[in-house]
Image (spheres, grey):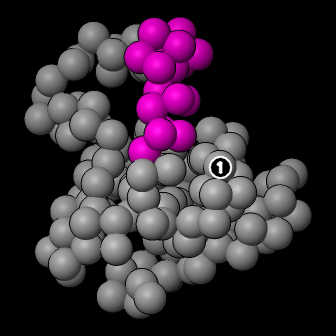
């Protein structure tokens, strides 16, 4: 199974770790190559712009929205690395919500690395896509 790793860019290190663990379990885990470059200390100009809050510009300049969509289409499933962020347990942000929707309408399985978030204004939309919560256990992928 080919599984594309998604998540808040805040979690890029954990996303790369997740991809590596998927591969060690025999899955064809993959991720946008820029995240792996960030972990290696490359493309620091993008990382610095991100820290300065220039996120929309980065997404446009690097065509990230369209590239993620193409990668979702080329996968059998997506896994959303949903860790705690901004006081929200198992955070799912706006970008990941859009990517989940893209996966859902294209009949891809949707996994959450952890459990469901709570208290987000778009919980109905998340729940309607029936993500499979792994509760930290990648071996539970089916």
Whether residue 19 appears in magenta in the rendering, the answer is no
Q: Which residue is mark 1?
A: 102
Find residue 5 and report its image quarter: bottom left
Residue at (49, 82) in percent of width and height: 134
Horizontal and vertical percent position of residue 79 = 47, 64
On-image quarter of the C terminus: bottom left
On-image quarter of the N terminus: bottom left
Asked whether residue 54 is in view, the answer is: no
Horizontal and vertical percent position of residue 137 = 39, 84
Find residue 138 and report its image quarter: bottom left
Asked whether residue 28 is in view, the answer is: yes
Residue at (23, 17) in percent of width and height: 44
Q: Is residue 61 above or below residue 111?
A: above
Horizontal and vertical percent position of residue 129 = 74, 68
47, 88: nearer the viewer: 47
Q: Is residue 56 above or below residue 71?
A: above
Left or right: 22 with respect to 68?
Answer: left
109, 123: nearer the viewer: 109
Which secondary structure dominates the residues rendered in magenta?
helix
122, 88: nearer the viewer: 122
Q: How many marks?
A: 1
> Magenta residues?
55-71
Q: Is residue 52 above or below residue 4?
A: above
Horizontal and vertical percent position of residue 66 = 53, 29
Mark 1 residue crowding within 10 angstroms, few (<14) / some (14–19) / many (20+)? some
Q: Is residue 64 above or below residue 44?
A: below
Residue at (87, 64) in percent of width and height: 124
Residue at (71, 57) in percent of width and height: 105
Whether residue 69 appears in magenta in the rendering, the answer is yes
Q: Secondary structure at mark 1?
A: helix
């Amino acid at each position: 199974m080919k599984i594309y790793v998604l998540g808040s860019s805040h979690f890029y290190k954990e996303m790369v770790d997740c991809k590596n663990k998927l591969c060690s379990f025999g899955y064809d885990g993959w991720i946008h190559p820029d995240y792996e470059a960030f972990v290696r200390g490359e493309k620091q100009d993008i990382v610095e712009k991100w820290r300065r809050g220039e996120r929309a510009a980065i997404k446009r300049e690097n065509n990230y929205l369209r590239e993620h969509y193409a990668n979702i289409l080329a996968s059998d499933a997506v896994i959303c690395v949903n860790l705690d962020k901004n006081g929200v347990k198992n955070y799912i942000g706006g970008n990941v919500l859009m990517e989940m929707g893209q996966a859902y309408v294209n009949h891809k399985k949707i996994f959450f690395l952890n459990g469901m978030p709570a208290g987000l204004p778009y919980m109905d939309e998340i729940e309607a896509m029936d993500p499979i919560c792994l509760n930290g256990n990648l071996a539970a992928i089916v």
